[in-house]
Amino acid sequence: MIVLWLSELITDYGLGNGASLLIYTNIISSLPNLGNKIISENSENFSLSSILGIGILIFVSLYGIVFLQEGSRKIPLLSSKQLNQTSPQNSVTTNNYIPLRFNQAGVMPIILTTAILVVPNYISNLGLLPQINLPINFESLKFIYWIGYFLLILAFSLFYSTIVLNPKDISDQLQKMAVTIPGIRPGVQTTFYLKQVMKRITLIGATMLAILATLPNFIESTLNITSLNGLSTTSLLILAGVILDLVREVKNIYYSNIYNNMYQ
């Protein structure tokens, strides 16, 4: 209850969303302990290659996450007023567009995948499954597990994006507002065009999300370094999202103050 009250106070009187900022603070506060754990558990295995591997992991993860959070495909729009102008080709401005983000699903695919893959282990621990002794190589089983993890994240990302955005609804809204996509007829053609674009960008975003989610485990297995799972993609997505939201809010406050001073 106290945490909920604090989050409401931060939302009302501070910057950004209170709950997100509290989660952000919790993740940031755990990073020093995670760093100490990685160093203490891998002091004998540390080498130049392992340090480079961790550096590449952090750089690629941060770059990919910012790209997923901010990257989008801009679909240009043309209004009926612009069509009445003498040169409609020159009237299409970069300000009139639909931003279709690469990552519409956020962290939900990772959460759902983790929840599903935990179920067999949970059932086995309860003793509900019979114990079968098979000569299975642990490394091959681990490889199959991460292939399944990758494919499930990919599938959930593609599925979730179709729920978040419906091309038919977007097409109907554009038709009601007398707005079209240049070179595309309103109605069925617009819906088909949006479906094709969304399939491509969702596949790119889903593939990147799946790669980023499995990258820490790949580095961990390749370089024989433990505790890298603490650098989870979910935590990094939350950190990047909160920071980017704060930057946007600070910019909005800054520009609104400038405009207010101009008209006073």
Image: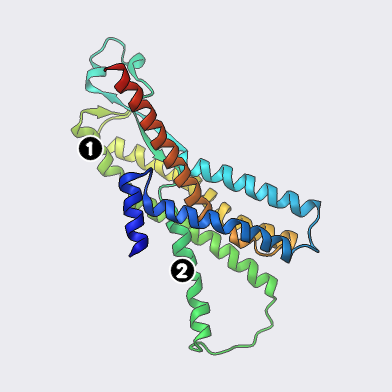
Tags 1 and 2 in contact by the CB under 8 Å rule? no
Q: Say whether residue 49 is left or right of residue 254.
A: right
Residue occupied by mark 1: 173
Q: Secondary structure at mark 2?
A: helix
Nearest the viewer among 202 and 113 is 113
Q: Quadrant of residue 6?
A: bottom left
List the single residue furthest toward the top.
86
What's the mark number on residue 134?
none
Amino acid type, mark 1? Gln
Q: Is residue 219 visible?
A: yes
Callout 1: few (<14), some (14-19), or many (20+) C-alpha neighbours within 10 Å?
few
Q: Quadrant of residue 196?
A: top left
Q: Position of residue 91 (x, y in %)?
A: 33, 16
Q: Quadrant of the C terminus?
A: top left
Residue under the point 48% across and 88% down? 128
Q: Position of residue 179 (x, y in %)?
A: 25, 28
Residue under the point 43% across and 55% down? 22
Vertical order, 68 against 142 (above or below): above
Q: Position of residue 105 (x, y in %)?
A: 41, 52
What's the mark number on residue 115?
2
Nearest the viewer among 101 and 34 is 34
Q: Say whether residue 45 is left or right of residue 95.
A: right
Disc 1 versus disc 2: distance between alpha carbons?
36 Å
Q: Say whether residue 219 is left or right of residue 74.
A: right
